[in-house]
């Protein structure tokens, strides 16, 4: 049974953000016609807000983003039930390039930059589906938010991990998206760079009004920048509410924020006890 924490309608305290830009309604996803990964998952992202999607490895977080961005088919996956609405219109079943043109861009786990192409060439790949008349302005925005990237004009493979993550986010901005799906932006980064990347995410949301759906295992950082959050367990939502309420929830504290009480044994904690309490 899903546990609900009372949630406010607006993200980040902005009343104008109450209308859901993205609504994922009761979807099931199957891989190779056999493996059921998402089991009736529902969530929404409010326009102009940051929504965090938390959960353990294998919970189905990345699959959720791929379902939204239309990338399941490339991995022999398919949505077999439910619907995904963006701006009130169904997008499940559309091709990935059509979804990008509608204003959704995914920053993939592991950055996925093309290392033997230049920084500028990587950025221009993000502009492929955008209005060509806005390319120069979008590039200016990227260099404004990522001045370090502006200085790097060589091959992208020579960038540091933090710079590659900035490049990946910059590539997303080149598409002028309304909604950015971010998959583990802190992966492989030092604590200092993690703070810098999350600061930039918050700034892009605040100054450009870009809506963000953020998949992240660093729950502390995710809930600092997000207005709302969802916790996934075994392909479904087990808990949701405002970021503040989730930070104060005892289950979230115990399993995701590192503030559990000392135990003699952790046997079965992440399977039986958590399942019993939430599901």
Image (tube, rainbow, N blue to C red):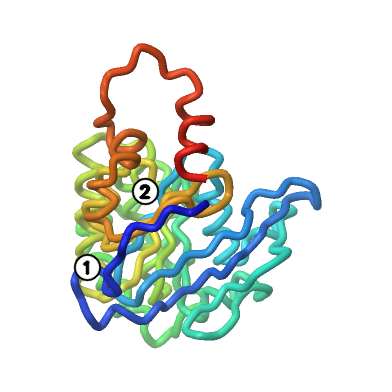
In space, the residues marked 2 and 1 are separated at their CA atoms by: 20 Å
Q: Are marks 2 and 1 in contact (CB under 8 Å)?
A: no
Q: Is residue 39 visible?
A: yes
In the rendered image, which residue does mark 1 sit on? 12
Picture coordinates of residue 277, whole percent (x, y): 45, 39
Picture coordinates of residue 207, whole percent (x, y): 19, 73
Mark drawn on residue 185: 2
Q: Answer left or right for 131 relative to 17.
A: right
Quadrant in which residue 241 is drawn = bottom left
Q: Answer left or right for 203 relative to 162.
A: left
Is disc 1 placed on a helix, strand or loop? loop
Is disc 2 placed on a helix, strand or loop? loop
Answer few, some or many: residues within 10 Å of disc 1's Cα (few below 14, many 20 plus, some between 14 and 19).
many
Q: Classify 258 as above or below 85.
A: above
Q: Is residue 151 visible?
A: no
- Residue, far right: 33
Q: Nearer the viewer, residue 158 or 50?
A: 50
Q: Nearer the viewer, residue 199 or 227?
A: 227
Picture coordinates of residue 260, whole percent (x, y): 28, 28
Quadrant in which residue 15 is drawn = bottom left
């Amino acid at each position: 049974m899903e546990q609900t924490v009372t949630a406010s309608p607006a993200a980040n305290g902005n009343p104008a953000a109450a209308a859901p830009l993205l609504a994922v309604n009761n979807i099931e996803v199957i891989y190779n016609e056999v493996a059921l990964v998402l089991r009736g998952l529902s969530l929404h992202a409010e326009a102009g807000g940051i929504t965090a999607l938390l959960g353990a490895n294998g919970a189905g977080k990345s699959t959720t983003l791929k379902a939204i961005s239309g990338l399941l088919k490339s991995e022999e996956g398919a949505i077999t039930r439910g619907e995904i609405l963006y701006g009130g219109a169904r997008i499940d079943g559309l091709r990935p390039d059509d979804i990008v043109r509608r204003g959704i861009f995914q920053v993939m786990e592991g950055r996925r930059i093309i290392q033997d192409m230049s920084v500028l060439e990587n950025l221009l790949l993000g502009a492929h589906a955008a209005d060509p008349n806005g390319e120069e302005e979008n590039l200016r925005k990227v260099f404004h938010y990522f001045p370090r990237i502006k200085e790097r004009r060589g091959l992208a493979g020579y960038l540091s991990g933090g710079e590659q993550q900035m490049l990946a986010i910059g590539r997303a901005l080149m598409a002028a998206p309304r909604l950015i799906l971010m998959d583990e932006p802190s992966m492989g980064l030092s604590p200092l760079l993690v703070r810098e990347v999350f600061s930039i995410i918050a700034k892009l949301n605040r100054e450009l009004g870009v809506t963000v759906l953020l998949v992240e295992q660093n729950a502390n950082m995710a809930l600092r920048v997000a207005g709302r959050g969802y916790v996934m367990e075994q392909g479904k939502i087990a808990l949701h509410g405002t970021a503040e309420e989730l930070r104060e929830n005892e289950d979230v504290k115990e399993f995701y924020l590192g503030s559990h009480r000392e135990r003699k044994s952790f046997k079965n904690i992440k399977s039986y006890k958590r399942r019993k309490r939430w599901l």
